[in-house]
Amino acid sequence: MASRFWVGNPLEPSESDGPPAAMVLCAGFGTRLLPLTEELPKPLVPVGDGSVLDHIAAALRQAGVRRLVVNGHHLAEVLRDALPSLVLPCAMVEEPVIRGTAGGVAGAAELLGDRDVVVVNGDILAEVDYAALLAAHGATPAVATLAVVGGLPAGQGTVGLDAAGRVVRLRAGRWGDEVAGGDFVGAQVLGPAARERLPADGCLVGDVYIPALDEGLEVRAAAVASGFVDVGSPPAYLAANLAWLRARGQSEWRGPGARVSKRVALREALVGPGAEVTGEGPVERCVVWPGARATAPLRDAVVTPAGRVVACAV
């Protein structure tokens, strides 16, 4: 039996006129990101000055979301302990058995209320205008609206769109004339009609969107994302941190309380809060996790508090 609990100061899920709720899908095994996920669940790995989940919660709050739900499986207790630091009041559903993306939302129904809900993958960092995504969904009769990076030629990207923005290509399915392509970034709005179709176990794309499209219902896409990175593997995770640095025009970042020897040269490196770098020489294209200890010279690696030095060349 899944357990549910609030962290922080929750709003009532039944509020019909309040701000929307959101769910971040955090239940997974983290297999592709091993061995980093032996210490942290994937949504909690640090990217820049916060975890993936921190960044998602901050973006949702900026868009007016005031209530957050997450699900957890691998290292669920570690995820649970991190929730009080989020910028939103949060509830968690622990899944003893993983239920999939659709089943995860179905299992949180009591906490999410019965309105539109924003659903976000917890292992993807995307630049999404969530307010625009909600507005786009509210302006159409679509059962769901997917956030995409648009502007791709027809036939390219993970989804195909018709002239009205309806999804007409998804996986191997075709439902109309495609005029443009887009890349789905793992963020979407589900309306009540889509939520009624959620299976107890299953996938949002394969078990909800594709059957809805087969029945002639509308699934739409909104070009409200400007980029995304999947932190699913060690090289991709390192790339996400380097992208965070470059987006800010920085060549290095040091968290509060970080200590770096004067004989160490940081080059495209991030040293987390309370971490220490000793030795002599360059530390280049590296992420030193909060509280970890690293020794120069070091290149293309992630260093964890447990002493793991994970090579992950980009």
Image (spheres, rainbow, N blue to C red):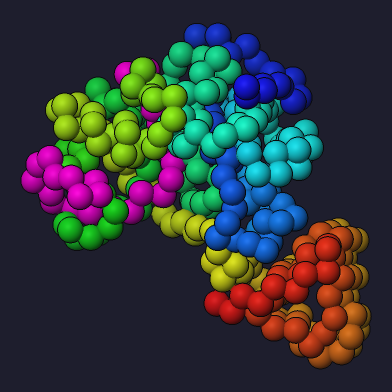
Compared to residue 66, the image places residue 242 above or below, namely below
Q: Is residue 222 magenta?
A: no
**Considering depth in this image, is 31 or 127 the residue closer to the camera?**
31
Left or right placement of residue 198 versus residue 33 in this view: left
The image shows residue 21 at horizontal and vertical percentages of: 54, 24
Q: Is residue 171 magenta?
A: yes
The answer to whether residue 254 shows anywhere in this view is: no
Compared to residue 36, the image places residue 159 above or below, namely above
Mainly helix, strand or loop, the magenta region?
Answer: strand
**Considering depth in this image, is 266 or 278 the residue closer to the camera?**
278
Residue at 16% over, 57% down: 154
Number of residue marks: 0
Where, quadrant-wise, is the N terminus in this rendering?
A: top right
Residue at 44% over, 57% down: 227
Left or right placement of residue 293 versus residue 204 in this view: right
The answer to whether residue 227 shows anywhere in this view is: yes
Residue at 83% over, 63% down: 306
Compared to residue 308, the image places residue 46 above or below, namely above
- Extreme left residue here? 177
The image shows residue 278 at horizontal and vertical percentages of: 90, 80
**Considering depth in this image, is 123 or 39 the residue closer to the camera?**
39
Part of the protein shown in magenta: 169-193
Where, quadrant-wise, is the C terminus in this rendering?
A: bottom right
The image shows residue 304 at horizontal and vertical percentages of: 78, 65
